[in-house]
Image: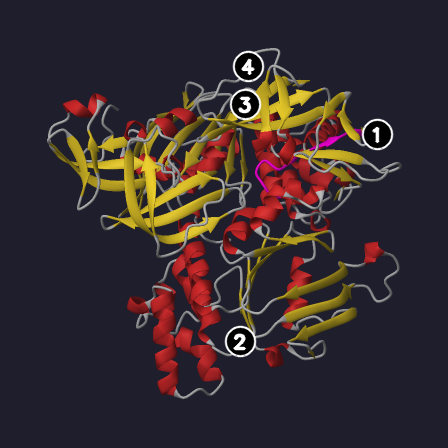
Amino acid sequence: MARITLDNLRHSYMANPKGPADYALKQLDVTWEDGGAYALLGPSGCGKTTLLNIISGLLRPSEGRVLFDGDDVTDEPPVARNIAQVFQFPVVYDTMTVYDNLAFPLRNRGIPERDVKARVEVIAAMTDLTEMLPKRAAGLTADGKQKISLGRGLVREDVNVIMFDEPLTVIDPHLKWQLRSKLKELHTRIQRTMIYVTHDQTEALTFADRVVVMHDGYVVQIGTPVELFERPHHTFVGHFIGSPGMNVLACQVENGKAFFDGHPVTVDNPPAGSLQGKQTEIGIRPQFVRFGDDGIPVEIAKVSDAGRYRIVDARHGQSRINLLVAEDADIPASGARVSFDAAQTRLYADGWLVE
Amino acid sequence: MTLELRNVSLRVGGETHIYPTTVTLVEGEFNILLGTTLAGKTTLMQLMAGLRYPTSGEIWFNGGNVTQVSVQKRNVSMVYQQFINYPNLSVFENIASPLRVARIARREIRNRVERMAELLQLTPMLGRRPSELSGGQQQRTALARALVKDADLILLDEPLVNLDYKLREELRDELPRLFEGRRCTVVYSTTEPGEALLLGGHTAAMHEGRITQFGPTAQIYRAPADLITAKVFSDPPINAVPVTKSNGAFRVEEGVSWPANGKAAALEDGPYVVGIRPHLISPVGDGREQVRIDGQVLITELSGSESVVHFEHGGHVWISQSHGIHALKVGETASFHFDADQCLYFDASGRRIGS
């Protein structure tokens, strides 16, 4: 077990990087506390996989250091780092039994067979594989095989961190629930550091105690799921988390007050100083926009039925404002106006939350 | 451009892949095939396309029997979940390829490709090779090729499944607009109930080689004909709990009971299954719910804006999905509430009462 620190990390795949655009990872200072359940969340191409490979030792960063419990492991190979990894697709030895698959990492390390047996049985019970132990892995379904991969990731007691790289991609939605719950439960039981890499916000938010959001080679926010939802530090976080994401509307700021196309909007974080020369925007989640008698006039472009709620695509000129309304709520046929819950309306300057 | 399946079935080597299926698809709308992996969605699409021939039954298209007509002679486009493009051709030539095959005039090809590229935001990429594109751009290229040739039947087999979450949201929003005003039949398969709802149109719920129900999407969701359809159309899974009706009340074995009101009052005594969607069970009552159940919390998943709680009551695992963060502790006993009038009731054979 270890605390993992990424210190002043930068990485470029080019031999002679010049500007920031040449870096896949631009500047990272992140500490992963021992025993935490983390998610690394971002769209494809944001640098997640690069970061994962740097932690596991498959890639040496161009600049900066990787520390495990304060020890510099930047130049250590993967095998010296004691890391377990679970990949997108199940990696299973088809000809072996489930038991032998789970025992593999332990036998590899020369652990006595009696200890192997005890440990495999514990892990099999945790992952609901006990009855499958004597069976050949080849006969299992995709989720069964992925459970073996998870089990193998958990079986060693001496690992510093377990990393999951999009582990539920191949799993059907109705089984995802079960496996995700299982993972969460396993984390609670074994209290080992876990890093779950995904582009899926639901998976990240439900699994992790803390989510590290990446965008374009930067970490834009590290926070609890509630913080990411309620107080996105960057418009990207607001947009990326939540479905549909936060509405981001260009606004003018005059004398510390925000205006959207001439309409005054009360924000929760009025600026203390001048924002002159900066691009200013209002961020408001669709959950906190309401229809009312006053407010900003909108045309309704589309209403989508999502079952337990409806998504209303409303337009004010060129700006799109999404609202979530209850399944049984009324949607005005004409002359609609919308207003924002002031406590949940935030001001952003050049993309960053004004503080 | 109506596509009609009349008693179409497919047997392969003594095994039934598609049971006799009769359905008339709706032109100009999305026809969604919703079901888990192996429900038969892809097979049914292959039969519709003419890529496979049915063992029995007939396929009629636009008033003509096309059962034995090969795929080349039907005007069909298909998009698969894996992005399929010609790797050695530019994006422009990829999109143009079906028009070249159809010997369309050069200028007309240019016009149509450019219009399609505009619609799918591929204009800056027209000169590039597929390998130089992101996954989303590659899939948009495949979509553009399928749409450019004005096919009568367009089959989209889980086309968004390999894309990033946010991109999926964006394309899901765009897709229905692409087909607006076109005289074609669109079939779209998905494993995700939420996706089916947001796309709208008509939905065929599929389970183990059968269409269990076909109709307007929102109607199938709100008034499923049977328990299987309700299960296919619920994520997280619908709570389906056996109950017994006697003395004017429903009772969960060794658990709560509630009065059988409304239509349910007239039902004969005996065993039923109650179906309650997770979002109708709340850890905080708002006073409208009549039924309170106390259960032991098994799992909590907090996603930043909502809470999903799995709990045990009367020997069954129940799932509650609610707005806001309800940080219940695993192992504690908590109260949950639901409104019996919003429940679905199914008889012993699985038919919904009142359907």
- Given this view, does label 1 or label 3 mark the residue nearer the observer? 1
Give the crowd class for mark 1: few <14, some 14-19, many >=20 residues within 10 Å: few
Q: CA distance from mark 1 to mark 3?
A: 37 Å
State the image coordinates of residue B276 (x, y, percent, origin top left).
32, 36
In which quadrant of the rendered image does the C terminus of chain B lie? top left
Q: What chain does mark 4 sit on?
A: A
Q: Specify which label sits upstream in the sequence, 3 or 4.
A: 3
Give SS at disc 1: loop
Using the image, determine if residue B134 lies above or below residue B28.
below
Give the crowd class for mark 3: few <14, some 14-19, many >=20 residues within 10 Å: some
Foreground pick, B136 / A255 = A255
Give SS at disc 2: loop
Q: CA distance from mark 3 to mark 4?
A: 11 Å
Q: CA distance from mark 4 to mark 1?
A: 34 Å
- Given this view, does label 2 or label 4 mark the residue nearer the observer? 4
Identity of the residue drawn at 47% across and 88% down: A110
Q: Are marks 1 and 3 in contact (CB under 8 Å)?
A: no
Tag 1 residue: A255
Q: Specify which label sits upstream in the sequence, 1 or 3.
A: 1
Q: Are marks 1 and 2 in contact (CB under 8 Å)?
A: no
Q: Which mark is residue A159?
A: 2
Tag 3 residue: A303
- Given this view, does label 3 or label 4 mark the residue nearer the observer? 4
Tag 4 residue: A332
Q: Specify which label sits upstream in the sequence, 3 or 2.
A: 2
Q: Specify which label sits upstream in the sequence, 2 or 4.
A: 2
- The stretch of residues the image draws in magenta is A241-252
